[in-house]
Amino acid sequence: AVRCEGGPKARSSHVAVEHQGSVYMFGGEFTSPSLAKFSHYGDTWRFEVRGEGNAGVWEDLSPLCTGTSPSPRSGHRATIAGGRMIIFGGFFDNGKEVRYYNDLHVLHLEERRWEHLGGGRGTSFNSGSPWPSARSGCGLVAQGKDTLLLLGGFTREGAAAASGEEEAGGSATWDFWRCDLTREAKGKGGTKAVWKEVGGLESSEGAPQDRAGFGMVVAGEEGRQQLLVFGGVHDEVEEEHMESVFYPDLFAYSPATSTWALAPSRGAWPNSRMNPHMAAVGSSICIFGGKVDGGDREATLDDIWLGNWAP
């Protein structure tokens, strides 16, 4: 662990991405050990990993960035595309009401400028063109410099949700979207990005089943890249009992053919889990950690798996 003075406050469910030797972080939430205090953050930070003379230094970018940044939140997702940090969705809980978002924001890293590309809170946003619904905990990755892929998520809104009432419920959103960052939607309420629902999750035998807490990454050599989805959990509720089903499977989506396929497991293989972290460099992929629980059993994993993806 590296301890640095003057860094961000303790938090979880934030986002962090790497670009040219720096880690950029936004948002998150904090819960006190006694559970008496809960708060969301809307700040932006940069951590220098390998800079000359300032490696290991945090910088608060919040007062330095122009434009309008996303509102405080957690459970949002971020990725890097063409020198930009892209942020989508998330939620905010003030103890009285829970708000979920479907807004899309861009931080131009060199300019340190925020830009809102479209979307808003809940279902109040309507651009007149297709747009993903409000959610948190989705999968978001960049395919090249100008394309985003978004998968799944979860939403629960209202005063009942904030109070933790069981009847507040919640719903998993199991859909698949592609976003073109080079186009703008015309007409009233036009947006600076165009979304299109890809589909194919229900009709393809090789597609992953409804789940949350999965890992997602783009892997493969240039021109042959595929979207990989690993693990996750599906909660099955019967009366007052909830059973969680964890998955160890790996699925691949080919943008060139718009098809899904279940990857065959060979030799040693990561066990079932939710919330694994995935990274890829070319065709090399890495899976780290995650969580498994059920009944009175709970385990946080710290294992690392390395593999080579060859479609």
Image (cartoon, helix red, strand yellow):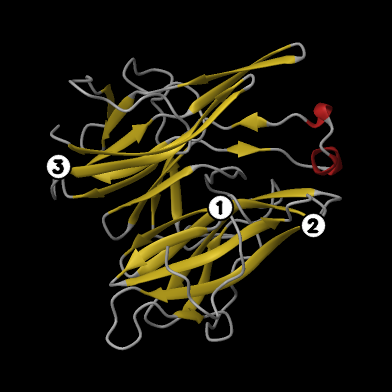
Circles 1 and 2: CB atoms closer than 8 Å: no
**Residue 266 shows in the view:** yes
- From the viewer's side, name the closer residue of 253 and 241: 241
**Badge 1 is on which residue?**
76
Camera-side mark, 2 or 3: 2
Could you tell me the amino acid type at mark 3? Arg
Mark 1 crowd level (few <14, some 14–19, many ≥20, 10 Å Cα)? many
Q: Is 160 displayed left or right of 213 in the figure?
A: right
Mark 2 crowd level (few <14, some 14–19, many ≥20, 10 Å Cα)? few
| Circle number at residue 37 | 2
Q: Secondary structure at mark 3?
A: loop
Q: Residue at x 55, y 38 (%)?
A: 153
Of the numbered discs 3 and 1, the one sitting upstream in the chain is: 1
Q: Position of residue 47 (x, y in %)?
A: 42, 74
Q: Position of residue 146 (x, y in %)?
A: 32, 59
Q: Residue at x 52, y 82 (%)?
A: 65
Circles 3 and 1: CB atoms closer than 8 Å: no
Can you say whether 150 is above or below 189 in the image?
above
Q: Quadrant of the C terminus?
A: top left
Of the numbered discs 1 and 2, the one sitting upstream in the chain is: 2
